[in-house]
Amino acid sequence: MPKKILIVDDEPDVRVFLETLLQENGYETRTANDGNEAANIVSDFMPDAITLDIIMPKETGVKFYRHLKKDESLKHIPVIVLSGVTRFKDLFDLDRQAMPKPYAFVEKPIERDDLLDKIKQAVEKPREVES
Amino acid sequence: MASDKPQPPVAEVLWPQREVLEQLPFNVAVIDREFNVVDANRDFEEYFGEWRGRKCYQVYKKSDKPCAHCNALETFEDGETRVTDETGIDQKGRPTHYVVHSAPLRKDPSQPVEYVLEMSSDVTETRRWQREYQILFDRVPCYISVIDSDFKIIRANEAFREQFGDAIGEHCFKIYKRRTSKCPECPAEKTFKDGQAHRSNQIGTSKKGEVTHYQVTTSPLRRGEDKVAHVIEISNDVTDLKKLQEEMIDAERLAAVGQTVAGLAHSVKNILMGLEGGKYIVSLGLQKEDKALIEKGWEMLERNFDKTTMLVKDFLEFAKGRQPAAVWIDPNELVDEIVGLYRDVAAQNGIELRADLDPEIGQSPLDPDGMHTCLTNLVSNAIDACNMSEKEEAYVEIRTRRENGKLIFEVADNGHGIDYEIKKKIFTTFFTTKGGEGTGLGLLTTRKIVQEHGGKIVVRSKPGEGARFRIELPQDRLERLLELAESEDND
C-alpha cells in the first residue's frame, strides 16, 4: 500500500507540482488550499506525512500546525514545513505555547531530491513525538 | 526724659497744620541743615525706626557718617525739588529701595531754605519684581523680541541675542532672516493691523549662519485702548524637533524599503517554484510521451512567465521616483478625475461610485501622478471588494476633508471587508488575496507614495461590512515638499 502525503499550499501551481512529483515517486496524495481545508480532511485521510506552507491567507499554516499538534490522534504525523520566508523558523520559536518543532523545513523554491529525501525519512522512521 | 511733656518738634512750630503729615501716603521726615531729623510721621518711624535726636544718615542708612552725595544738601543750597532713587536699611536691618522727593521748606521764597521735607516711598517690592521679570525675560528658553511699528527691535532677551546676535535698533527681518526687506506673510504686521495674536512657522538664520526653525507667536503691546504700539514676538526653537521629524520620516521610508525587498524576494520565490514545477512536469511529460502532462506543465510555465512580467511592471511603478513632485492642486479635482475614470467600470459591476467632497477644501501641494496612483489603487480594490460581496446595493465612496491641519482622503466601500489576519499584512508584504490576479504591490505602492508625502494610511474594516481606507496628509509636511523641491533645484 502506498504511503499517503497531504499537501497544504495556497498556490495552485505548487499543489500541482508537488502532487505530480509525489505521485510519480509512488505516494498517494491529497491537497488542501488552506489550513481550514487541511483540518477538515486530515482525520479522514490520515496521511503518513504532511507538507505545509505556513504563510497563507485566512487560516495560516501555523494555526493548522497548532491544531494538529494538540490532537492526540494526529500529533504523531510528521510535518515538513515549506516556505519562501527565509527566517520561517522564528515563527515557531516565537510561538508562546511551546509547540514541538516540525519534522523538517524546506525552503521554496524546493530542491526536488532534498524534499523527496525528507519525505522518505519522515514516512519510514517518524521521530518519537516529544510531548 | 527731663520733662513729662515732650518738646514740640521744631517743624510743628514752623508748620501749624502738622497733622497733614500723617495723611500723606509716604514716609515723611523733616531735616535741618545739620542733618538732624526734626520731625517725621508715624509711617516713617515704623519704616526706619527711632529718629528723635538722630542724624538723617543714621536713620536712613544706619550709617555713622554723611552720605557721599547728599540731595538734601543740594536742595538747601538751590531751593529746588529733587526726586532720587536711594537704597537704605529699614528698622529691621533689611536693605530697602525707596524713591525720595526732597522739597524745600522756608517762610517765603526770598528766604533761605530752613528745612528739607523728604517724602519717600518703598519700591523694594517693585524692584524685586523688576529683577525677577528681567531674569525671566532673559532666561526663559524662548527667543523674545519687542519690535516697534517700523519693524525695529527695541528689546531682545538673552536667548535671542545668543542665537541671533545684537539686535537693538535693527530691523527684525535683518536679524531673524538676514533679509533686506520685510518678510512676506509677516505675522507681526498682522498683529499691528488687527491687534490679535498670530502664530506661524518660520525659518531664520542664526548669527552663525545656521538654519533655525522657529514657531513664533506675535502679541500686541498697547497702552490703554490705543492702537498697537509694539509687538512682542515669542519664538520656540523647533530646529531639533524638525530634524527628528525628518529622521523619523527617513526611518519610515527605510523600513518600507526593507519590507518591500523581503516581499519581493517572497514573490520571486513563489514564481520560481511555479517555474520549477512547470519545468519538471513538462520534462516528465516528454519522458512519458504524455501530451496532457506536457500541456499542464506548459500552462504552468506560461502563467508564471506572465506573473513575472506583471511583477516587474508593478515593481517599476513602485520604484518610480523618490521625491514627490508636488504642485499646488485642488484635491477635489483629483477625485473627480478618478470618479470619471471608474464610474463606468463600477456601474457595469452594479456598484455606485460616488464622491463626497468638502467644497472648502482649498489647495494642497501634492504629486498629482502619485496621488492618482494611490486613489486608483484604493478604488479598484474597493470595487473588487464589492464584487466579492453578495450585497444588493454596493457602493464605493471617495471623500475629501480637512481635519486638524491635515488633508484627508477616504475611500470607503460596503464590500466583503477585511478580516483581522489579513489586515495585519496588507501594507507589509507582497500580499494578495487575489491569487494569480494580483502582485500584492498596489497597497504597498500606495503606502509608499503616502509616506513620501509625509502622511500615513490607515484602514478600518469589519468582515462583511466593508472597509474604509484613510489617507492623512499633514498640510505643513506637504508644504515642506515644496521647500525641499526648491532647495534641490538650487543645489
Image (cartoon, rainbow, N blue to C red):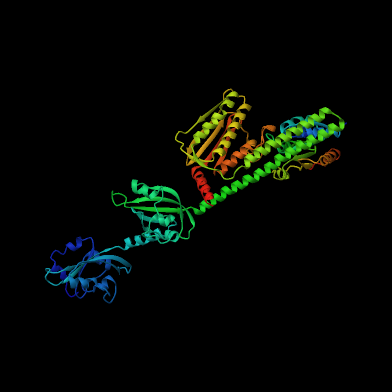
Q: Residue furthest front?
A: B490
Q: Residue B377: tell me if it is visible.
A: yes
Q: Residue A42: tell me if it is visible.
A: no
Q: Tell me the quarter of the picture where residue B278 sits.
A: top right
| Left or right of A22 in this view: B446 | left
From the viewer's side, name the closer residue of B30 and B428. B428
From the viewer's side, name the closer residue of B414 and B44. B414
Query: Could you tell me residue A49's position as x and y percent?
Result: 81, 36
Query: Could you tell me residue B255's position as x and y percent?
Result: 62, 46
Query: Could you tell me residue B288's position as x and y percent?
Result: 87, 31
Total number of numbered discs in the rendering: 0
Q: Residue at x 47, y 42 (%)?
A: B405
| Left or right of B315 in this view: B176 | left
In the picture, the quarter occupied by the N terminus of chain B is bottom left
Q: Which residue is drawn at 48% across and 60% down?
A: B208
Query: Could you tell me residue A13's position as x and y percent?
Result: 75, 33
Q: Tell me the quarter of the picture where residue B325 sits.
A: top right
Q: Tell me the quarter of the picture where residue B296 sits.
A: top right
| Left or right of B234 in this view: B22 | left
